[in-house]
């Protein structure tokens, strides 16, 4: 959750920001902090380059957790969480990462440590996750392994 707050603060947006507003804010920042605008000052160029990387990372992260994004990918999310088994679990600082056997990877934010411990010790991790994690926490799709035929 701290990461989300930091990214919102960096871009100067609140949790109610829409994708169109986020895109507009991002474009305005990139106009201001684009490294190609600095030609004669190498130190300033490196500083602006670092700032632009932070802005890009924040933008992509906030897009991935936006309600519009989650709504657009809800069908695939429900399919994965209801039919694919858990392949791996990683927990770090209230962030739970679940890798599924279909290649999908989701991060869940604000997960208490005791919920993680219960998940790890559950007789059926999939059933526990469906009941206590998948619909209870903010999530984002981290990656999807491409399937080659």
Image (cartoon, rainbow, N blue to C red):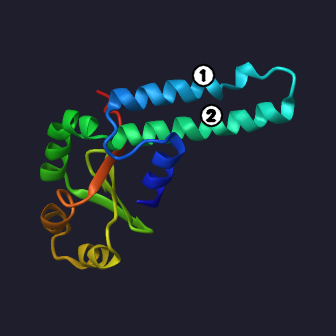
Disc 1: which residue: 31
Which of the image's four quarters has the N terminus?
A: bottom left
**N-terminal label among 1 and 2:** 1
User: Residue at left 14%, top 61%?
Assistant: 130
Disc 2: which residue: 52
Which of the image's four quarters has the C terminus?
A: top left
Give the quadrant of residue 93: bottom left
Q: What kind of element bears circle 1?
A: helix
Q: Residues within 10 Å of mark 2 (few under 14, many from 20)?
A: many
With respect to residue 46, does 91 lie above or below?
A: below
- 82 to the left or right of 49: left
- Residue 65 visible at all: yes
Give the quadrant of residue 88: bottom left
Q: Are marks 1 and 2 in contact (CB under 8 Å)?
A: no
- 115 to the left or right of 127: right
Distance (Cα) linking label 1 and label 2: 10 Å
Q: Residues within 10 Å of mark 1 (few under 14, many from 20)?
A: few
Q: How many tags in the picture?
A: 2
| Residue nearer the viewer, 33 or 84 | 33
Q: What kind of element bears circle 2?
A: helix
User: Residue at left 40%, top 41%?
Assistant: 62
With respect to residue 50, does 148 lie above or below?
A: above
Q: Position of residue 116 (x, y in %)?
A: 30, 73
Q: Which numbered mark, 1 or 2, is in the foreground of this view? A: 1
- Residue 144 visible at all: no
Q: Position of residue 140 (x, y in %)?
A: 33, 47
| Residue nearer the viewer, 34 or 61 | 34
Q: Position of residue 139 (x, y in %)?
A: 30, 52
Looking at the rendered structure, which numbered label has been put on residue 78? none
User: Residue at left 73%, top 20%?
Assistant: 37
């Amino acid at each position: 959750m701290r990461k989300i707050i930091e990214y919102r603060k960096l871009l100067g947006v609140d949790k109610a920001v829409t994708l169109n507003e986020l895109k507009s804010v991002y474009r305005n920042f990139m106009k201001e902090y684009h490294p190609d605008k600095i030609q004669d000052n190498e130190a300033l160029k490196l500083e602006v380059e670092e700032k632009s990387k932070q802005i890009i990372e924040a933008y992509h992260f906030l897009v991935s957790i936006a309600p519009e994004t989650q709504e657009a990918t809800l069908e695939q999310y429900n399919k994965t969480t209801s039919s694919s088994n858990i392949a791996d679990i990683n927990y770090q600082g209230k962030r739970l990462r679940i890798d599924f056997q279909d290649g999908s990877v989701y991060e869940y934010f604000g997960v208490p440590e005791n919920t993680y411990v219960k998940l790890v010790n559950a007789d059926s991790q999939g059933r526990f996750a469906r009941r206590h994690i998948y619909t209870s926490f903010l999530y984002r799709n981290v990656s999807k392994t491409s399937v080659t035929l």
